[in-house]
Amino acid sequence: MESKKFLLQEREIPQAWYNIIPDMASKPLPLIHPATKQPLTAEDLYPIFSKAASQQELNTTDRWIEIPGEVREMYRIWRPTPLVRATGLEKLLDTPAHIYFKNESVSPVGSHKLNSAIAQAYYCKQEGVTNITTETGAGQWGAALSLAAKHFGLELAVYMVKISFNQKPYRRSIMQTYGAEVISSPSMSTKAGRKIITNQPNYQGSLGTAISEAVELAMSTPNCKYVLGSVLNHVALHQTVIGLEAEKQMEMAGEYPDVVVACFGGGSNFSGLAFPFLRHKLNGDHAATRFVAAEPASCPKLTRGIFQYDFGDEAGYTPLIPMFTLGHNFQPANIHAGGLRYHGGGAIISQLKHDNLIEAVDIQQLDSFKAATIFARSEGIIPAPESSHAIAATINEALKCKVAGESKTILFNLSGHGLIDMTAYDRYFANDLANHEVTAQEIAQSTKDLEKIL
């Protein structure tokens, strides 16, 4: 019986990742070399990323990209992840909606981030790389890459955004347990970090700053590559195992989602759940399905940013990315959803948003924690602050169904659990958290110097 169960699980794990670009009528605009202003080639990316990741980043023709056997072997530890009908939440909300969630919190590190961390670490190892660098906000990506790096025998340095470094010490401990070096960013270990600290001694950091430091270290260290946890196309590609599994599981449940929801920082978990379902809409089926990205009101790039070429980091080391952005110098408020404090969206998602194929909503911090508490008390799982934004958006959709008397099927991504975020919950229950609103003047100021290429 046990062997049959094992084989069933093996068959359910996708054999290939889904690349959405071939199905898009309007392709994402190309990444641009900041010096030449010409579209990037894979070779331009080789000094920073692994060759395989660079080639996947620019692949616009192959709809399916095979998952390497060794990567699939590691996926088998926790994949496929459960698809759960949230009957407790439905009952509490008294809604006719059917609510499902894909539970990515069951991975060894408690989030979806391991899906891409394993793949990227594998490609680096195959290339003979010995050292890798990365950034992390809340620490979910850093924890995932720390485990993947240890498995493949790679040395890892993680630049962790300072505010999260201090707010989330146990995430730092997890990374150190797996053997990674964790540096609070901005730091004095890089030119980019020293410049920021000199200009703003009390700056609490951002993902853009941490990316600058990680890229600089990778470029100045022999046999070292930079590994990214969100935003870029190859990361979105690896995460599609989520939606490909969910697609089969929804079919087993006899339903198809009318609304697909995920939180949004740079786009990794939203892409992972949404893209496999979105391909049907792009091909003319299930045209009425809506796709909703839920971002924090304090970092509202999709809802209030501008569609423009911008750097992916603060120092300007990365290629120029066509994105909805608040400006690479934007300094987000110190909310507890550290993984969503990024100034821009990935090129694919930005193009989809530009073409009105996906929607975006902004969620206030207090509303996200209220939704998290409702979910925990009805479903028993304490969600990560990032995932709580998707839950808040899902609750809003379910309540609309209640008012309209419509029975819609809503699917959202529970991208991670919050068991290491309990200090944030403590502050919420103590009424020690606040909402943060970005003014139009702040957005205008942070975007005014962007070079107008579009």
Image: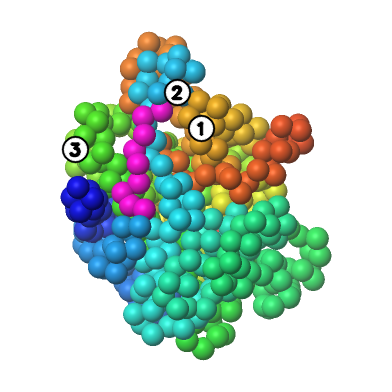
Expressed as whole percent of the image width and height from the top left, the position of residue 421 reads 63, 46
Amino acid bearing label 3: Gly
Q: Which residue position holds label 2? A: 88
Q: Secondary structure at mark 3?
A: loop
Q: Secondary structure at mark 1?
A: loop
Find the distance from the CA under tag 2 to the CA under tag 3: 34 Å
Which of the image's four quarters has the C terminus?
bottom left
Q: Is residue 111 left or right of residue 427?
A: left
Q: Which residue position holds label 3? A: 284
Q: Nearer the viewer, mark 1 or mark 3?
A: 1
Amino acid bearing label 1: Gly
CB contact under 8 Å: marks 1 and 3: no
Q: Which residue position holds label 1? A: 380
CB contact under 8 Å: marks 2 and 1: yes
Q: Which residues are magenta?
A: 78-86
How packed mark 3 is, by other alpha carbons closer than 10 Å (few <14, some 14-19, many 20 or more), is few
